[in-house]
Image: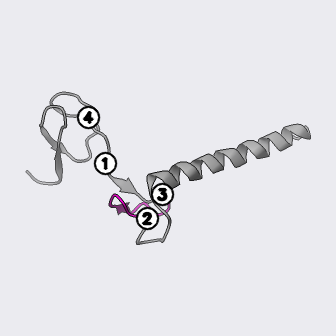
């Protein structure tokens, strides 16, 4: 077979690595690839910084960044509401 393949963890069928579902049993395939949110470069598990752009990477960093972004947006909205500027 050409291209990159992985095995379904439910039925063992070889499927293209970009598949979202198994072609044989329909099992949802979890994406195990990691990409830098800044430049899009794929990186290996355990990487702390992107080798292309130097951005901090990792699941925990992404969650924390998203949390603070939402929190800052909320605070901005709340302050506007206090002064009736919405």
* Alpha carbon separation for disc pair 2 and 3: 13 Å
Label 4 crowd (10 A; few <14 / some 14-19 / many >=20) = some
Question: CB atoms at circles 3 and 4 under 8 Å apart?
Answer: no
Which image quadrant is residue 26 in?
A: top left
Q: Residue 37 carries which label?
A: 3
Query: Residues in magenta?
Result: 38-48
Q: Earlier in the sequence, mark 4 or mark 1?
A: 4
State which mark lies toward you, 4 or 1. Answer: 1
The type of colouring in the image is: one colour
Q: Earlier in the sequence, mark 2 or mark 4?
A: 4
Question: CB atoms at circles 2 and 4 under 8 Å apart?
Answer: no
Which image quadrant is residue 44 in?
A: bottom left
| Rendering coords of residue 22 (x, y %) | 21, 34
Residue most extreme to the right: 83
Q: Which residue is drawn at 18% across and 33% down?
A: 23
Secondary element at image label 3: loop
Q: Which of marks 3 and 1 is nearer the N terminus?
A: 1
| Rendering coords of residue 53 (x, y %) | 47, 71
Q: Please say whether residue 86 is visible from this viewpoint.
A: no
Q: Earlier in the sequence, mark 2 or mark 3?
A: 3
Label 3 crowd (10 A; few <14 / some 14-19 / many >=20) = some
Q: Residue 48 carries which label?
A: 2
Q: Please say whether residue 34 is visible from this viewpoint.
A: yes
Whether residue 25 is in magenta: the answer is no
Q: Name the residue under label 1.
A: 32
């Amino acid at each position: 077979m050409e291209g990159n393949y992985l095995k379904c963890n439910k039925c063992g069928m070889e499927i293209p690595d970009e598949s979202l579902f198994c072609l044989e049993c329909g099992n949802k395939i979890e994406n195990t690839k990691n990409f830098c949110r800044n430049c899009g470069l794929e990186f290996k598990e355990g990487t702390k910084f992107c080798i292309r752009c130097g951005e901090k990477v990792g699941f925990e960093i992404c969650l924390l960044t998203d949390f603070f972004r939402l929190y800052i947006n909320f605070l901005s909205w709340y302050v506007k509401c206090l002064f009736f500027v919405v």
